[in-house]
Amino acid sequence: MLWTVLFALLLLLVLQAQLCVCLRELRASTATASASALALPPLPPPPSQTTTTAATAATNATAQRLPGAIIIGVRKGGTRALLEMLNLHPDVEVAKAEVHYFNLDENYRRGLDWYRAQMPFTLPGQLTVEKTPGYFAAPLAPERAWQMNPAVRLLLIVRDPAERLVSDYTQVLHNRLQRHKPYQPLEELLLLDDDIDDDGGGGNDRRARRIDPGYKALQRSLYHVHFQRWLEHFPREQIHVVDGEALVRDPYPELRKAELFLELPPRIRPSNFYFNTTKGFYCLVSAGHDKCLDESKGRPHAPLSQRAFHKLCRFLREPNKRFFDLVGRTFRWC
Ligand code: A3P
C-alpha cells in the first residue's frame, strides 16, 4: 500500500515537472512570435549590400548603400519637402535626384549595382533614403522593391487627391509651356461630354459633363488602387503614411512621427523650420543656412471651375473611403 502511494507521488512530481517545461516553452515561443509580429525589421542594410570604394573605405568607411527607406509617393504630395526635411537628420543621407529604378524598365534592367550607384555615400549606421513618387502607381514597383529588400521601410505622403490632381495637371502644363508644346485646359481633360437625348428625336439635346475615369492624373489620385497593390507585398506597419496637408501647416510633428517610424533618435527640432511669408510655406534651417524649396513647389494652380472641382470631389468620395479603410485612418479631404 505504502509503495503504491509513494509510486503515485513520484509519478505526480514527474508529470508536474514536464508540465512546467512545456509551459515555459510555450511562453517563450509566443513571446518571440508577438515580438516579430510587432517589430519592424532592423534598418541598416547588410554589409553584402554595400559597395565600398578602396580609398574611402580606408579613411572613413563611407559607402554607397541600398536605401533602408523609400518615399514612394504620391506625386505632388509633398515628396520633395519630406525628403529635404528628413535630410535634416544627421543619421540620414538622401539621394538628391529621383532614381526611377522600380518603375522604369530601362533603369530596372540596369540592376542593383546601378541602383546602388545612384545612392549617396553614407557612414555605417546612417540611413539611406531615396524618393521617387512614380513608384506609388507603378504596377511592378511593389514586387520589385520587395525583391530588393523585403525589410525596406516605405513612406507615403498623401494630400487631398482632388488638389493633387490639379497640382499634377499644373506641373504637366508648365512643362509643356516651357517646351512650347500645345496643351488642353484641365476641364477638357477631366470632363467628358455626354449627350442626353431630351426628346428622343435627336434635336435640342442637353449636354451633361461627367468625370472621365480614364484621365491619367485622376487615376493617380485613386490612392486605394495603388495602396492595395503595395499591401499585397508589404505589411501595413512597414508603410508609414504622412499627412501632406499637416506637413504644410506645421512640418515638425510629421517629422517627429517619421523619425519614430524609422527608429531614428530625435534630432530634428522645431527650430529647423521657419515660416517664410514670401514663399507662403515653411523653409528649412540647418547649420545656420536656410533653404526653401524651389519655385516649382507651391506655385499657383491652373484654373478649374468650382462646378468641375465639386464634381471631382463627388467622384472621389468613394475611392477616398476605400483608401481610409485600407490605411486605418481618415483625412479631411473635399
Ligand atoms: P503644390 O505645388 O501643388 O502647392 P512634390 O514634391 O511631391 O512634387 O509635391 C509638391 C507639393 O509639396 C507642393 O504642391 C506643395 O504644396 C507641397 N509642399 C509641402 N511642403 C512644402 C514646403 N515646405 N515648401 C513648398 N512646397 C511644399
Image: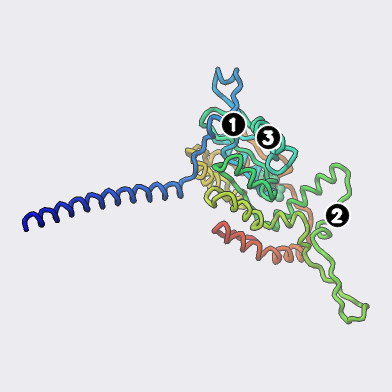
Query: Looking at the image, which residue is at 89% across and 76% down?
Result: 205
Q: Residues within 10 Å of mark 3 (few under 14, many from 20)?
A: few
The amino acid marked with disc number 3 is Gly
| Three-letter residue code for mark 1 | Arg
Q: Relative to residue 217, is residue 110 depicted above or below?
A: above
The residue under label 2 is which amino acid type? Answer: Gln
Indicate how the structure is coloured in the image: rainbow
Q: Quadrant of residue 5?
A: bottom left
Label 1 SS: strand
Q: Is residue 55 left or right of residue 140?
A: left
Q: Where's residue 273, x and y in %?
A: 58, 41
The secondary structure type at the circle numbered 3 is helix
Closer to the camera, 313 or 305?
Answer: 313
Residue 90 in sight from this viewpoint = no
Of badges 3 and 1, the one in the foreground is 3
Nearer to me, 270 or 188: 188
Q: Which residue is mark 1?
A: 65
Residue where numbered disc 2 is placed: 184
Q: Position of residue 164 (x, y in %)?
A: 70, 53
**In the image, the residue with mark 3 has its CB under 8 Å from the nearest atom of ligand 1:** no
Q: Which residue is mark 3?
A: 111
**Residue 98 or 104: which is nearer the viewer?**
104
